[in-house]
Amino acid sequence: MDKWQEIRWSYEKLDQPRPEVQRIDGIRLEVFEQRTIAHHEAEYWSFHSDRSFHIALRDGARRTGRWRLKGRGHILTLRYADGTVEVYDVKEIDRERLVLNLDLGMEVRGIARLEFARQENTSSPTHRLVSKTEGRMSAELPRDRTTLALESNP
Amino acid sequence: MTLLSVSPSRQSLHDHLLGASTAGVAGLVNVCSVMAFFAFATNVTGHVAVFAEELVKGHLHQMSIVAVWLFAFLLGAGLSNFVAYQGKNRSTTLLWSTLPLGLEVILLAGVGYYGTTSYSETLRETEFLVSVLLFAMGIQNGLVATISGGVVKTTHLTGLLTDLGIELALLLRPEERCSSSLQFKLRLHLLILAFYITGGLLGGLLFIRSQFHAFYFGSTVLTLLIAHDLVVSRPVRQRVHRLGTSLLAKSQGP
């Protein structure tokens, strides 16, 4: 299984002052004037070829759910087990780096930019593939494409 | 009065009714497509821009997907024009005009049915279903434009808002203000805009409530449009009239 380590959150195009940050149980709350945005302080995001994912939080907790690609492969949706849905725009993807933009919604004009670094896969060599240039995270693609998500057979 | 026949005797009311109903469907389909697939089904200009962007970035796969989407719209528009013109100057002109719309009804209902029963949200399914919707919208836009002689186009609003802006500016000129042509176009474009927005709002609400069933609403509206034309068209009316006359004659006896 391939892992992506979250290395940076940043905000772009904000029309509000920098958010006030609070931390509660591994969840970072960013308080804007009209809206509070919660996101996990995660160490690793892991995508599986059965289109499930888990996010390992720094406090040891895990969030799980299913991921899907939409549009022309440029939209990543994460649906958590509790029914919450997050929508990300896949901005960059290559062997080493994944950049996602999270739309902050209509109430807050701006973009949260998440950057990830791929962790080396040390498990089975039966890697399943996802495209570098095509931005796919599916395991349905041929082998000659650069790996984004690697999945080992159990 | 039929709305779908290619006839020089078309009146402005035909174009208004046709434009309003199909614009409502286009708005509905576009919003449902965005909510279901995160891709527009009627904004071809946007897809062309995305095509160029993906080309510049070297994302060949995404570029080819967008190219397929654009081709699907093009094919739909071309097909409906080809079929509709087969019926020109024939007694079966209405039948030829309803064929493309019938195909669109099937496609929209098919997307609704597949989305409800089989859609597992793979990227390939998503790309294919967006292609189907773009093909359907191409059919609709091509047919409506063909029938109305290019006056009515209902699936995208860039050109419409341009025309509307020009027409509103012309209203400021006293010598143009009373022009019947200007008033016709202004009414038509405002009607299309209003129904597109209404269709979009309705599509959003329906999709939130009933997911892919929302597409059935679009196909129902188009089915009613076809049914209306078949019922009020002269051959049908004539047959009904002949049947009634013969029944009356039989009942009166020799």
Image (spheres, coloured by chain):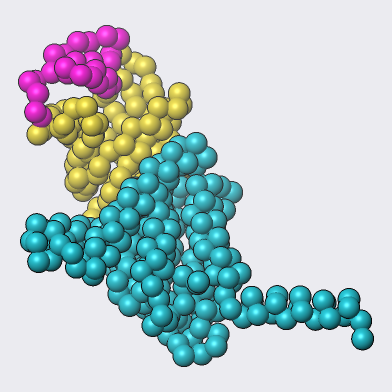
Q: Nearer the viewer, residue B48 or B236?
A: B236
Instruction: Check residue B72 for magenta coloring.
Output: no
Q: Is residue A105 left or right of residue B212?
A: left
Q: Residue furthest bottom?
A: B89
Instruction: Check residue A38 for magenta coloring.
Output: yes
Rendering colour (chain A): yellow
Q: Percent x, y for residue A44? A: 29, 28
Q: Is residue B96 left or right of residue A132?
A: right
Rendering colour (chain B): cyan
Q: Percent x, y for residue B32? A: 41, 48
- At x 42%, y 85%, the residue is B85
Q: Where, quadrant-wise, is the C terminus of chain B in this rendering?
A: bottom right
Residue B12: image quadrant is: bottom left
Extent of the magenta region: A14-41
Number of numbered discs on residues: 0
Q: Nearer the viewer, residue A88 or B70?
A: B70
- At x 46%, y 70%, the residue is B3
Is residue B234 in sight in this rendering?
yes
Q: Percent x, y for residue B84? A: 45, 81
